[in-house]
Amino acid sequence: MDLQALVEIRRKHETRQAKMTEAPPKEVTIRTNLIREFEAVLKEQQDRSIGTGVERATRWTGSSNRPTTTSSGLPSGNAANAASVAKAAAKKALNRRKAIFKEAGMPLLPVIGEGRITMLRPLVLGDYGVFSTDAGLMIGKVITLYTKGAGKNGKHSAVLQVDTITAISYVGVQLFQQLFRQQFRAIPEATALFQCHQFAHLPSMAFLCVLVQSLKITPTGFDLNATDLTLFETLKSASAKLTNVVKISRRRGKANVLEDEVFDT
């Protein structure tokens, strides 16, 4: 295919400015090459701080010009203080959680006290757990996790995992309702009219514990294994005591109130 005709048309209609910009590239002189080599040698011999990249990332992505991490990636300064305060608050909230369940007379205190969540077995996205909701006890699949920063103006932020149940400020879940014994359905009564799944945004007090064994997926939901079914039935039989948990957690007073400690579903 000959494009010569198009080339000629392009040249005829070419503007004066376009012709002037098509100057041949300048030849690189020996002096320019020497300067470039000197700059390369100087750059190689210059010392570079270990934390330069981290500090630059902090300046661009952080809210302050001061680095919040050390060269090893650990928090420092205000960030370290905030993390320490948040950890202490979570521990205090965990003790209160256990005290509330004990006062309400809840069964399986060793299990629901910490919810089977530890540093060795953190709660991660995709885990299944037992949740207390307005519609009763249900199984929930964890979709999102939120934690609250320390301080009065601490912000809620999404995280991928937590190693303390009370470190959760809110958890987003898909809810599954018990149909019969070990059978749970993905479309509960609350959304059966619309034939869609049900989702909820629940506080940590509504999260009782994580399941320990895998589920058997079915076309309409899943079947619970024998161990987790026994756990679920035991907690379900304590529905009246769960109501007391709600009342106690809402109790006001200096010794009982923790910031953002609610049980609304």
Image (spheres, rainbow, N blue to C red):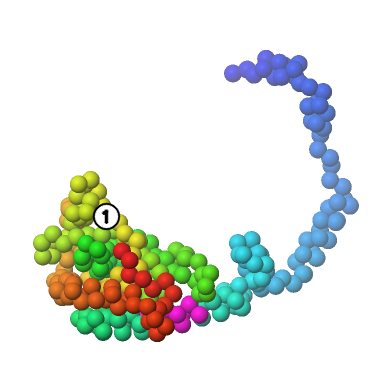
* 155 on left or right of 195: right
- Total numbered labels placed on residues in the image: 1
Verify whether residue 92 appears in magenta. Answer: yes
Image coordinates of residue 45 in percent, x first then y, are 77, 69
Neighbourhood count class around disc 1 (C-alpha, 10 Å): few under 14, some 14–19, many 20 upward? some
Above-or-below relation of 217 to 150: above
How far across and how far down the image is residue 237, in percent?
14, 74
Q: Residue at x 70, y 72 (%)?
A: 49
- Prevailing secondary structure class for the magenta stretch in the rendered image: helix
Is residue 100 or residue 251 the one in the foreground?
251
Is residue 55 found left or right of 249 in the rendered image? right
Q: Is residue 89 visible?
A: yes
Q: Is residue 65 left or right of residue 197?
A: right
Quadrant housing the N terminus: top right
Q: Residue at x 75, y 66 (%)?
A: 44
Residue range corresponding to the magenta coloring: 85-94
Residue extending farthest front: 253
Residue underneath mark 1: 198
Label 1 sits on a secondary structure element that is strand
Which residue occupies 89% across, 52% down?
A: 31
Q: Position of residue 106 (x, y in %)?
A: 22, 80
